[in-house]
Image: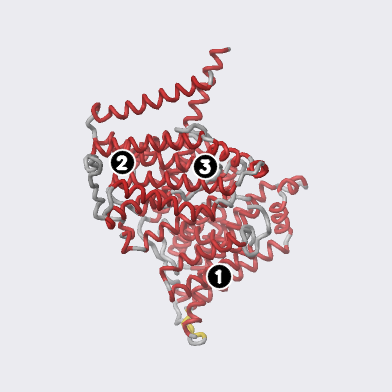
Amino acid sequence: MSCIVTQTSAGLIVGALLFLVAGGLTLIFGVLKIVNFAHGSLYMLGAYLALSAFRMTDNFFIAVIVAGLGVALFGVLFERFLMRRVYNADVLMQLLVCYAVVLIMDDAVKIIWGAEFQSMGMPAEFQLAPLFIGGGVVPVFYLFLISAAAVIAIALWYVLTRTRMGKIVRAAAHNPSMTSVLGLNTSMIYGGVFAIGGLLAGLAGGLAAPVRSMSSGMGFSILIESFIVTVIGGMGSVTGALVGALMIGLVRSFGSIGFPLFVEGLMFLAMVLILVFKPSGLLGKETRI
Amino acid sequence: MTQSASFKREWLWVIAVVLLLLALPSLTSSRTAQDFVVRLAAYGIFASSLNILVGYGGMVSFGHAMFFGGGSYAFSLLMQKAGTSIPVGIVGGVLFCALLGLVVGAICVRLKEIYFSFITLAFQMLVHSVILTWTSLTGGDQGLMGGIPRREFWGINLANNTTLYFFALAVGVICLLLMRYILQSPYGYTLRMVRDNADRARFLGIDVWRVKLYAFILAASFAGIGGIIMALFVSGAYPEFSYWTSSGEAVFMIMMGGLHVFVGPVVGAALLLLFNDVISRNTEFHGLALGIVVLVFALGFKRGITDFVLQAFSKLKQKRTA
C-alpha cells in the first residue's frame, strides 16, 4: 500500500510534466498541422531560464513565471522568423528547420550555461519534511507540482472552450481558410498558438527544474515521450494528451519496480498497439493522418 | 538529346569517376584522401538508400540511422562473437536490417507525412536505447570495443588499408548501380506513382502498402551495408551511429545534394563530410555551425547543389538553341 502511494505520486509528476509539453505539441499540431520537432528544446530552454532566474532572485515562483513567459516569447520568434517560411513547403524542409534549431539550441545552452550537468536544488520553500499519505512517502514539492499542473490544465481547458480566443483557435484548427475569410487574422493566431505552446513547455521546464538535472540533451528525450503521449491520446486532442501523459507517467513509475529495463519498450509497445488498432489515438478524431 | 545519348553520357561519367577513384591510391599516398573515400562510400550508400524513401517514395524518414547502426552492430557482433567470415557477416548484417525494416516498416508505412517522420524517429530512439542499455552485448555507451577481426577471405585482406579502400569503393559502386537499377525498373516507377498519387495507384490495383513496405525494406538493407562499411573502417560500432543526429545528417545530405538527381545524395554526403571535417577542426560547437548551415540551405536556397547545376546547364542549353 505504502509503495503504491509513493509510486503513484512519482508517476503523476512525470505525467504532469509530460502533459504540459505534449499539450503544447498537440495544440500546435491541431491548429497548424505541423509537428514541432523543436518542442523539446523549448522545455529545455524553460528549465535553464528558470535556473538563471532562480539564482538571481532566489524566488522559485518568479523563476517559473520567467521561464514560461521567456519561452513563450521565444516560441513567437521561432514561429515568425523560421517556421512561418516552411508552412507550405514539404515535410522535408520543416524537419530540417527544426533539426537545425535543435542543434543550435543544444550548443547555445552549452555556451551560455556550460556543458556540464546543472541542477537547481530544492527551493527553500519546499525543503519540508515529506508527507506520509496512506503510509507512503510523498515530498511536498510533488504535491505542489501536481497541483500547479492541474491548475494550468484547467486554465488551458477554460481558455480553449469558454473564451472567444479559444473559439477562434478552434475555428482556425477546423478550417483555416474559412477562418481568415471571416476576417480573423490567422497569421496572428498561428503566432499565438506557438506562444501558448512555448508558455506550457517553459512552465514545464521551470517546474521540472528542482527535480531534474539539466543538460543540453534533455529536450530530446522529453520530445520522444511527448510524441508517444500525443500518439496514444490522439494528435490534436488536448484531453487525449492529458490521458496519455498520465498513462505513460504511471506506466513508467510502476514499470520501473517490476522490470526497469523494459519500461521504455513498454511505452513503445503501447504506442504500436494504438497505431495498429486505432491510428487516430484514444481520443483523436477519425481523420486521415 | 535522345534517350540513348543521355544514357551513354551517364555511363561515361560513371566510368570516368570510377577510373579516377581506382587510380587515386597510385596518384597520392595520402591516407586522408583514401579514408575520405571509404567514409564517403559508407555515407553515400546511407544517404542514397534514404533517398529511395524520401525522393522516390515521398516518405520522409527521420529514423533511418537505426539501420545504419543496426547493420554495423549486427555485422560487428557476428564477426566478434560468432567468429564468422566477412562475407557471412555482411550477409547476416544485411539480413538483420531487412528483418528490422520489415517489422518497423509494417507499422510505419501506413502513416503519412510528418506522422511517418516522427514514428520512424521514435523507433530509432528505441533502437538507440536498446543499444545503450544492453551493455553485456553491445558495450553500452562505450560502443563495441575490442576491434573487429578482419579475417582474410578469397585472398582479400581488409586489414590492409589500400585493400579496404578498393573494397569499399567496389561495394559503394555496386550498391549505387543496384539502387539505380531498381529505381529504373517497373517497381521504381510504381513507387514514384505511389508518391505522386497514392489514390490513383490504388485505383489501378496496386497494393500501396506493399510497395511502400518493399521500399522501406530495400532502404533498410542498403543503409545496413553503409553501416557495415563504416564498422569495417572504424573497426567497431558506436551508439552514435544510430543516434537521431545521424538521421538528421542523412536527411540534410539528401537535401543539400539535391533530391532530383540520382547521385545528389552522394554529392551531399561528400559535402557534409568535408564540412564536418573542417568545423570539427576549428570549433567544438559543431551543432551550432551545422545548424546555421542547415538553416541557410533550407530557408535560403531551398534547393540542393545538383539542382542548381542542372538549372544552370539547362539555361546554357536554352541560350545555345536560342
Q: Which disc number belongs to residue B148? A: none
Q: Which disc number belongs to residue A247? A: 1
Secondary structure of residue under mark 2: helix
Chain ID of residue with mark 2: B
Chain ID of residue with mark 3: B
Residue A285 locus on image (x, y percent): 68, 59
A37 relative position to B139: left or right: right
Quarter holding residue B58: top right
Are discs 3 and 2 both within one chain? yes
Task: From the image, tell me which residue sits under label 2.
Answer: B281
Chain ID of residue with mark 1: A
Q: Distance between the Cα atoms at labels 1 and 3?
A: 34 Å
The image shows a total of numbered marks equal to: 3
Quarter of the image with the C terminus of chain B in it: top right
State yes or no: discs 3 and 2 in contact (Cβ < 8 Å). Answer: no
Q: Nearer the viewer, mark 3 or mark 2?
A: 3
Q: Nearer the viewer, mark 1 or mark 2?
A: 1
Q: Which disc number belongs to residue B54? A: 3
Q: Distance between the Cα atoms at labels 3 and 2?
A: 31 Å
Q: Pick whichever, A56 or A21, lies toward us.
A: A21
Q: As displayed, is residue B6 above or below residue A112?
A: above
Q: As displayed, is residue B67 above or below residue B308?
A: below
Residue A136 locus on image (x, y percent): 48, 84
Residue A239 locus on image (x, y percent): 64, 65
Q: Amino acid at mark 1?
A: Met
